[in-house]
Image (cartoon, rainbow, N blue to C red):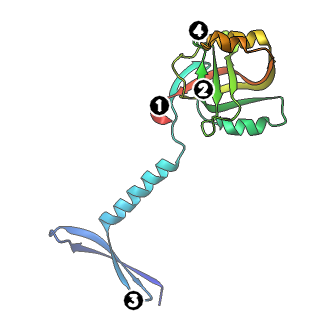
Amino acid sequence: MPLLHYKNVLRKNLHGKLTFACYINTSLHMRMLFSSKIWAAVIALGIVLAACNSTRSITGKTFGEPITAKGAITYDDLLEKLDGQDSLAVKVRGAVEGVCQAKGCWMNIVSAKDPSKESMFVKFKDYGFFMPKDIAGREVIMEGYAYREVTPVDELKHYAEDEGKSQAEIDAITQPKVELKFMASGVMLVDQAKQ
């Protein structure tokens, strides 16, 4: 005797309407009734879940060269990949910590998971585009080149002025600093609903 027997029938439901039903008989002589409406609901749910598990479409406003989110790694992954390397061409996704308040000509990026990790100073290729000054806390995707560089004291003081720091904070800068930097050729400011 086969383990499963299928029998398709038409039957009337409680409201007197004809519906398709599939009876499944097992070797244990259990009988289950599956209405076509239930099957349709199960199939529809499967389609919806499959769509939800696919890569969601990330959209946003782009600055500089047009980019998409495809292939972007997280800021945390970038920090791991840079370990032991001088530089890396990459597309990276991170959180904006701050933006130049004079023009929007640079920004600082931090890990969305752990903001206490090292930040990254981002400039824009050929001084060719600027970012909005009010995007602190927003997520961006950037394509370009990550590298480490020594920033001289006069440049650090200039950036502190751009950021709106007090004169006492600016005067406290007395040593050059080795920083993680990024030269972005394109940036996507991710739509807030997609973050």
Reading the image, the residue beneath label 3 is 29
- Give the number of the mark in front: 3 or 4: 4
Q: Is residue 174 visible?
A: yes
Per the model, the C-alpha gap separating discs 1 and 2 is 16 Å
Q: Nearer the viewer, residue 114 or 122?
A: 114
* Percent position of residue 92, x then y: 66, 32
Per the model, the C-alpha gap separating discs 2 and 3 is 65 Å
Q: Nearer the viewer, residue 143 or 182?
A: 182
Label 2 residue SS: strand
Q: Earlier in the sequence, mark 1 or mark 2?
A: 2
- Give the number of the mark in front: 2 or 3: 2
The residue drawn where x is 81% and y is 21% is 149
Reading the image, the residue beneath label 2 is 97
| Label 3: few (<14), some (14–19) or many (≥20) C-alpha neighbours in 10 Å | few
Left/right placement of residue 170 relative to residue 135 reads right
* Percent position of residue 153, x then y: 78, 12
Per the model, the C-alpha gap separating discs 4 and 1 is 24 Å
| Label 1: few (<14), some (14–19) or many (≥20) C-alpha neighbours in 10 Å | few
Label 4 residue SS: loop
Per the model, the C-alpha gap separating discs 2 and 4 is 16 Å
Reading the image, the residue beneath label 1 is 192
Reading the image, the residue beneath label 4 is 102
Q: Earlier in the sequence, mark 2 or mark 4?
A: 2
